[in-house]
Image: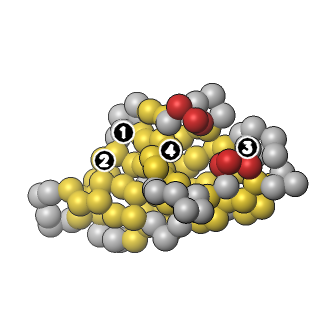
């Protein structure tokens, strides 16, 4: 199983970006999917998560600006980021709780991270 994150880049303050994270491999089902971020010198913090049923939760710092969504048919989670601020600059990571084909339990898998830089 692999998670491939994409969509990062350089954007001006107030701009928008959409991150994607696609899971592939021998997947039976996917539970919760998360986005985390890690800024320079900081710990990795959760930004948002979405359950298999579509319920969402956000860090206070991004509420009203970021939207997490998922396409279960594509095994993909998205993070729409708007009104971006310099303090949103970080490497963004996705993870997912995945049950592999032939297995009964879920395990957490991480993507490789994608850099988001907000600067004028």
Disc 4 and disc 1 in contact, CB within 8 angstroms: no
Distance CA(mark 1)–CA(mark 2):
6 Å
Q: Which mark is residue 47?
A: 4
* Residue in the picture at 46% in, 50% down: 45
Residue 59 locus on image (x, y percent): 50, 36
The quadrant in which the N terminus is found is bottom left
Q: Is residue 46 left or right of residue 52?
A: right
**Relative to the observer, which residue lies in front, 117 or 28?**
117
Q: Which residue is mark 3?
A: 84
At mark 1, the secondary structure is loop
**Relative to the observer, which residue lies in front, 63 or 109?**
63
* Residue in the picture at 58% in, 30% down: 63
Disc 1 and disc 2 in contact, CB within 8 angstroms: yes
Distance CA(mark 2)–CA(mark 4):
17 Å
**Circle 2 residues within 10 Å: few <14, some 14–19, many ≥20:** some
* Residue in the picture at 84% in, 51% down: 12
At mark 4, the secondary structure is strand
């Amino acid at each position: 199983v692999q998670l491939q994150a994409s969509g990062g880049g350089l954007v001006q303050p107030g701009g928008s970006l959409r991150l994607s994270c696609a899971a592939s491999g021998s997947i039976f089902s996917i539970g919760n999917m998360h986005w985390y971020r890690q800024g320079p010198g900081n710990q990795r913090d959760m930004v948002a998560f979405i359950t298999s049923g579509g319920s969402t939760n956000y860090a206070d710092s991004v509420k009203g600006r970021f939207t997490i969504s998922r396409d279960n048919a594509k095994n993909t989670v998205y993070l729409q980021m708007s009104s971006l601020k310099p303090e949103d600059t970080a490497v963004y990571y996705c993870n997912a709780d995945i049950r592999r084909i032939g297995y009964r339990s879920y395990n957490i898998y991480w993507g490789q991270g994608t850099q988001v830089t907000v600067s004028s």
